[in-house]
Image: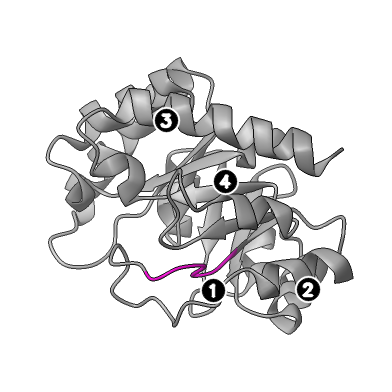
Amino acid sequence: MNKEILKLYFIMGSMNAKSPLDVLEAALQGGITCFQLREKGDHSLQGNEKYLFAKKCKELCQRYNVPFIINDDVELAIALNADGIHIGQEDEKAEVVRELIGPTKILGVSVHNPDEAFIAFKNGADYVGMGPVYPTSSKSDAKAPAGTSMIKRVAQLYPSLPIVGIGGITESNFTPVIKAGGLGVAVISAIASSEQPAEIAKGFLEKINSSLRRARG
């Protein structure tokens, strides 16, 4: 996996924006480096509607050469030949998912502490998502904010494991994630709720690149 794809990692479901496909295309035009379809929760699409929506999202991502990741739904990821899948601690185990999707697909795992990070790393995760860094309203099942202390700890323990910070992250508060050792940030509402998603994505990526350059010396 090219670690550069983790810089500006956009997550969205159909319920996160009024015109989600328009928002996704604008975000792609703005320069997001990865997209995860997270179709979960109240008013989320199901069955064939979910499949067709996911297919359109994948087609948009392909047009802009951006990896298309599906949250949790291994069956859908395989059916659509998605670039990868992201799972949480309550989903299927990482080693089982790796077996199902094969060695070349991207596997991301949400973790909250060094023990979970180690297990994910050992069982084939290409990257981990850590958070919530700040309070967030985008996920109803989010845990209490943890700041960046765990990101720093995991980055020190497993320097070859790519980390993405998630949870309440905006253009104005993401820098501590990079300073702590994160390779990028994952955002939902910062882009999905914006009136100008392309401009937000473009500006955000420029700031992330600048922070990464400073962090790398």
Please state the horizontal and vertical placement of residue 106, each as a whole percent of the image.
65, 46
Q: What residue sits 63% from the left and 57% below the top?
A: 176
> Is residue 79 positioned above or below 205 on the image?
below
- Give the residue number, with chain letter if any, for mark 4: 84
- Give the residue number, with chain letter if any, for mark 2: 153
Q: Amino acid at mark 3?
A: Ala
Counting residues from the N terminus, which is met first, the one under dot 3 or under dot 1? Answer: 1
Q: What residue sits 72% from the left and 54% below the top?
A: 179
Q: Amino acid at mark 1?
A: Glu
Q: Which residues fall within the magenta stretch?
A: 130-135
Secondary element under disc 2, as helix, strand or loop, is helix
Secondary element under disc 1, as helix, strand or loop, is loop
Question: What crowding class fits label 2: few (fewer than 14 Cα within 10 Å), some (14-19), or many (20 or more)?
Answer: some
Counting residues from the N terminus, which is met first, the one under dot 2 or under dot 4? Answer: 4
- Give the residue number, with chain letter if any, for mark 3: 201
Q: Amino acid at mark 2?
A: Arg
Please state the horizontal and vertical placement of residue 118, each as a whole percent of the image.
79, 75
Secondary element under disc 4, as helix, strand or loop, is strand
Q: What residue sits 35% from the left and 23% below the top?
A: 199
Rendering quarter of residue 100: bottom right
Rendering quarter of residue 26: top left
Counting residues from the N terminus, which is met first, the one under dot 4 or under dot 3? Answer: 4
The CA span between labels 4 and 3 is 22 Å
Magenta region includes residue 132: yes
Counting residues from the N terminus, which is met first, the one under dot 1 or under dot 4? Answer: 4
Circle number at residue 75 = none
